[in-house]
């Protein structure tokens, strides 16, 4: 594989006269650690974060002439305006390492390691800038594109620290739990199996309503977060709720008891690669008069009406080092039988936003028709359908009919 197959062809660069202030804006805004400096298109230097920060420290000559003031680290910050006003030519490395497009990719990686640099300008035979190669580009080309999509538990392990921030759980539970509790009391439900329970918000809320709840999730990190929540609950509530981290197989042997109801909230059923098998396993641990409730995103609307866009949310961060967190969620259209769910996370520190990561996972494209078929195969024949149209997971569960063109969420209630 050659450098040409991995490099970025649309490259940010600055001129020799660009101020350090504008260089910093570019570095910070692009979440990169440095940029090439060019005269016209010819590469003549490179500016990195390290080059800029080094200006805050005294040179050996400065220290020899005035060791007292040169060691005034607090006073160094006062040099900021002066440093930001400098041209790039006064701060750049004048002999930058470069590489050509036909260089073997792993040779470029070796060069980066030897020279301890993270980005290489790619030049043509005249020294003109035609691209840029980073360690990230190499990693994606050699490793990233060959990785399979993350499994459900891997995706949610990564998300667990922010799961209760991405959704306003307080607002969500305030409208979902009353509906669940009312239905369960009418059906004389005493205990509930919460499949794909995440951080346990529904299980805990149901336990607070007097029901026994068992939450099960394949993500050990999600279950850890749920178990931490239990510790602050009153003893009588703690005794009614439990969480386990297991795959959804051999549930009759694993759980050793029967349940009056099973819930799949927040598209939990769609996050299982084989929903039919999961329903078969769950049905084995349900009583003869049990009810199954499935809450699923209306994926057809997301793809066709919303043009793949799911949601963009900005939340106040609970962490001291962050002011806010932002979450962008969107889907890719079906390939090989599955949709792809994508989630990007951004955080805001003191002033600026920074990218914190992105993950993708396969999602089974459940529809009203498919869920109906799956449920009937496990002998749940009395099926009703409801919809919510106040955004994803922010509407009552059983008060509106499902409208394929308008409902954001499909809620299915099935009885034997």
Image (cartoon, rainbow, N blue to C red):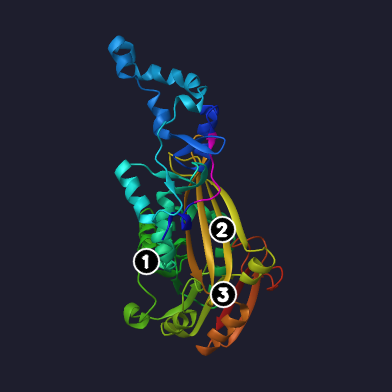
Circle 3 sits in a helix, a strand or a loop, which is it? loop
Q: Looking at the rendering, which quadrant does residue 242 occupy?
A: bottom left
For residue 234, above or below residue 69: below
On the image, the x and y values in percent for residue 373 come to 57, 86
| Mark 2 touches mark 1? (CB < 8 Å) | no
| Mark 3 touches mark 2? (CB < 8 Å) | no
On the image, the x and y values in percent for residue 385 come to 64, 77
Residue annotated with mark 1:
243
| Mark 1 touches mark 3? (CB < 8 Å) | no
For residue 20, above or below residue 329: above
Measure the alpha-carbon separation of dots 1 and 3.
27 Å
Count of all numbered marks drawn on residues in the image: 3
For residue 306, above or below residue 275: above
**Which one is earlier in the sequence, the residue at label 1 or at label 3?**
1
What residue lies at 35% left-to-right and 72% top-to-bottom? 246
**Which one is earlier in the sequence, the residue at label 2 or at label 1?**
1
Residue annotated with mark 2:
329
**Which one is earlier in the sequence, the residue at label 3 or at label 2?**
2
Measure the alpha-carbon separation of dots 3 and 2.
16 Å
Residue annotated with mark 3:
365
* Whether residue 298 is visible: no
What residue lies at 41% left-to-right and 66% top-to-bottom? 146
- Using a 10 Å C-alpha cutoff, classify the residue at mark 1 as few (fewer than 14 neighbours), some (14 to 19) or many (20 or more): many
Measure the alpha-carbon separation of dots 2 and 1.
27 Å
Per the picture, the main secondary structure of the magenta-coloured stretch is loop
Residue in front for this viewpoint, 288 or 81 = 81
* Whether residue 344 is visible: yes
Magenta residues (range) = 8-14
Circle 1 sits in a helix, a strand or a loop, which is it? strand
Residue 250 part of the magenta segment: no
On the image, the x and y values in percent for residue 255 come to 34, 77
């Amino acid at each position: 594989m050659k450098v040409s197959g991995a490099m970025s062809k649309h490259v940010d660069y600055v001129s020799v006269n660009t101020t350090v202030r504008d260089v910093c804006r570019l570095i910070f805004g692009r979440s990169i650690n440095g940029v090439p400096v060019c005269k016209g298109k010819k590469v003549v230097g490179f500016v990195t974060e390290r080059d800029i920060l080094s200006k805050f420290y005294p040179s050996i000559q400065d220290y020899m002439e005035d060791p007292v003031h040169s060691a005034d680290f607090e006073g160094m910050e006062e040099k900021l305006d002066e440093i930001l006003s400098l041209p790039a030519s006064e701060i750049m490395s004048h002999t930058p390492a470069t590489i050509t497009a036909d260089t073997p990719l792993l040779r470029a990686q070796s060069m980066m390691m030897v020279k301890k640099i993270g980005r290489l300008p790619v030049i043509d035979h005249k020294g003109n800038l035609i691209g840029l190669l980073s360690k990230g580009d190499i990693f994606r080309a050699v490793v990233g594109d060959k990785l399979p999509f993350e499994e459900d538990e891997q995706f949610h392990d990564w998300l667990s620290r922010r799961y209760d921030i991405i959704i306003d759980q307080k607002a969500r539970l305030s409208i979902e739990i009353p509906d669940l509790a009312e239905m369960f009391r009418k059906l004389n439900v005493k205990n509930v199996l919460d499949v794909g329970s995440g951080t346990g918000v529904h299980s805990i809320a149901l336990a607070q309503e007097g029901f026994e709840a068992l939450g099960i999730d394949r993500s050990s990190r999600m279950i850890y977060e749920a178990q931490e929540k239990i510790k602050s609950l009153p003893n009588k509530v703690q005794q009614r709720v439990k969480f386990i981290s297991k795959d959804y197989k051999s549930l009759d042997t694993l759980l050793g008891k029967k349940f009056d109801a099973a819930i799949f909230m927040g598209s939990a059923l769609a996050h299982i690669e084989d929903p039919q098998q999961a329903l078969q396993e769950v049905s084995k641990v349900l009583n003869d008069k049990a009810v199954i409730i499935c809450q699923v995103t209306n994926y057809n609307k997301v793809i066709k009406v919303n043009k793949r866009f799911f949601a963009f949310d900005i939340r106040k961060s609970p962490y001291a080092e962050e002011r806010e967190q932002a979450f962008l969620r969107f889907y890719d259209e079906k390939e090989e039988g599955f949709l792809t769910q994508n989630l990007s996370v951004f955080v805001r520190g003191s002033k600026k936003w920074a990218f914190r990561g992105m993950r993708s996972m396969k999602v089974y494209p459940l529809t009203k028709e498919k869920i109906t078929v799956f449920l009937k195969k496990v002998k749940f024949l009395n099926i009703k359908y409801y919809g919510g149209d106040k955004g994803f997971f922010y509407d009552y569960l059983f008060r509106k009919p499902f409208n394929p063109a308008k409902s954001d969420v499909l809620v299915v209630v099935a009885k034997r």
